[in-house]
Amino acid sequence: MSKTVLISGANGYFGGIACQYFQALGWQVLKATRGADADLVIDLDQPEALAQQRLSSRVDLFIHGAAAHEVTCREQPYRSIGQNVAGTRAALEFCLHNDIPKFVYLSTFHVFGNPQGVIDETSQPLPANDYGLSHLQAEDYVRLYRRQYALQGLVVRPSNFFGIPANIDRCNRWTLTPLAFCREAVEQGKIVLKTPGYQQRNFIAVKDLCAAIAAAVEQIEPYPLLHVAGPETLSIRALAQRVERVMNDLGQPVDLVLPEGEPLPEQFTFTSRYLSQLYRPSQTIDAFLSEFCSILSQRLVSTI
């Protein structure tokens, strides 16, 4: 019998790719969104309504990917805190009332604010803004429900995402650096950095993240918290240079504007004590950059 997963934020960037991934694994996928195509209509601005909803069929796993992202948290902090914190509590209550045994919360590396040194699951979070803090508070609710109600909860902290959006026309995460650089290069013929760009980022393919989640939920009990780090850590400057090379290979040279500045010392190593026991992420960002720039270029030509 196939398993059923309910994914909140299913029309979002992570959620759309996650739906594709779990469907390919043979799972029945239900979408929890605000949209008309939702299997479960949810609104994180109305957490009580979410908590009180009832399902008519069994669900084996709830992946909570709906949340206010970093831009929304900065522009609408009070609303975002409610969505991220109260919304997560409501999702947990929903699982209890509907006998959903497993819950995965998609948190973020940004609970560490401005990290330095080796960062693993034992490192102390130190958020630097509402985005990181609200995710950390939501994590605490997952831990609370795991302790008090024996809900099999797992907090997953990924690094920076990359992956081809499930629906490019509906993509709302163009602020993510890999997406932004590719779009800027294709549509404007240039990439302009506002800083020298020596700050580092660890990059994880969304499909690798989904594979790690799929592996972890099969033996969720020993892993209440899991860092999902990608195989590459790059500076923003180096990422822009890779996009420049990809565009050259496509025969579409771009202008790369890199402000002068001194290189920074090594800032951090994002890692996990447990991930290698479950799954080894392998997708590198170069293949994504090449494919995505090519897709965007073809779309641009078709509109001319």
Image: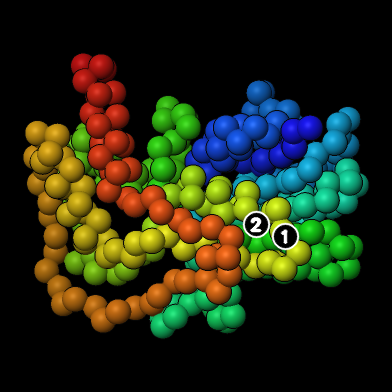
Helix, strand or loop for disc 1: loop
Who's the residue at 19% across and 76% down the image?
A: 263
Q: Where in the figure is residue 162, as x and y percent of width and height?
A: 40, 48
Residues at circles 2 and 1 in contact by the CB criterion of under 8 Å? yes
Q: Is residue 11 above or below residue 73?
A: above
Q: Where in the figure is residue 166, as x and y percent of width and height?
A: 48, 32
Who's the residue at 85% across and 36% down the image?
A: 58
Who's the residue at 17% across and 54% down the image?
A: 241
Question: In the drawing, does residue 116 fall left or right of residue 243?
Answer: right
Question: Disc 2 marks which residue?
Answer: 216
Residue 73 visible within the image: no
Which quadrant would residue 31 be assigned to in this image? top right
Which quadrant would residue 121 be assigned to in this image? bottom right
Q: Where in the figure is residue 190, as x and y percent of width and height?
A: 15, 44
Q: Which mark is residue 220?
A: 1
**Whole-Å distance between the Cαs marked 2 and 1?**
5 Å
Who's the residue at 83% across and 46% down the image?
A: 100
Quarter placement of the N terminus: top right
Which quadrant would residue 268 be assigned to in this image? bottom left
Q: Is 168 or 257 nearer to us in this picture?
A: 168
Given the image, on which type of amino acid does mark 2 rest?
Answer: Ala
Question: In the drawing, does residue 223 fall left or right of residue 15?
Answer: right
Given the image, on which type of amino acid does mark 1 rest?
Answer: Ile
